[in-house]
Amino acid sequence: MPDANTIPACLLGALERYANPRAQMFRGANTWESVPAQEMLRRVAGVAKGLEEMGIRAGDRVAIFAPNCPEWHIADFAIQGLGAVTVPIY
């Protein structure tokens, strides 16, 4: 688990305490869609595992080159959870 005063630790704490069925909301084709807390956590953990298997370690810089989308947040939390640094490219 990340240090208590980090953004990933705050995310994990909030997902544990509040376990909201609408932890992440985004605009779909015709309606608002939601991602439950447990699913969001599963996605973040999956991306973090993949990045770790690619050799990403604490202190590394990882660029996200993507439009504003739900996956952007998942990648950002995964990168920070590994102790790496997100470099946003818009």
Image (cartoon, rainbow, N blue to C red):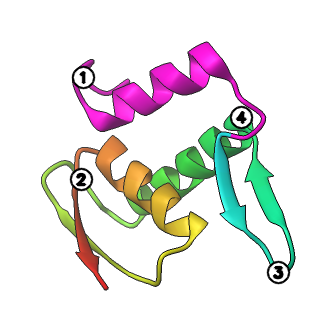
Q: Residue at x 58, y 26 (%)?
A: 15
Q: Residue at x 24, y 22 (%)?
A: 3
Q: Nearer the viewer, residue 87 or 47?
A: 87
Q: Which residue is mark 3?
A: 29
For label 1, the residue is 3
Camera-near label (2 vs 4) is 4
Label 4: element kind: helix
Q: Is residue 22 left or right of residue 54?
A: right
Amino acid at pointer 2:
Arg
> Which span is picked out in magenta?
1-22
Three-letter amino acid code at the position of disc 4: Gln
Alpha carbon separation for disc pair 3 and 2: 36 Å
On screen, residue 83 above or below 12: below
Say how many tags the image has.
Answer: 4
Which of pointers 3 and 2 indicates the residue nearer the eye?
3
Neighbor class of circle 1 (other Cα within 10 Å; few <14, some 14-19, many 20+) is few
Measured from the top left, where is residue 48 in percent x and y?
Answer: 46, 52
Q: Residues within 10 Å of mark 3 (few under 14, many from 20)?
A: few
Q: Pick out the residue farthest to the right.
A: 30
Amino acid type, callout 1? Asp
Residue hosting label 4 = 38
Q: For the residue marked with disc 3, what is the amino acid?
A: Ala
Q: Nearer the viewer, residue 81 or 22?
A: 22
Image coordinates for residue 82, horizontal then vertical, percent? 32, 45
Q: Residue at x 38, y 58 (%)?
A: 76
Earlier-in-chain disc, 1 versus 4? 1
Find residue 57 and name its label: 2
Placement of the C terminus among the 4 image quadrants = bottom left
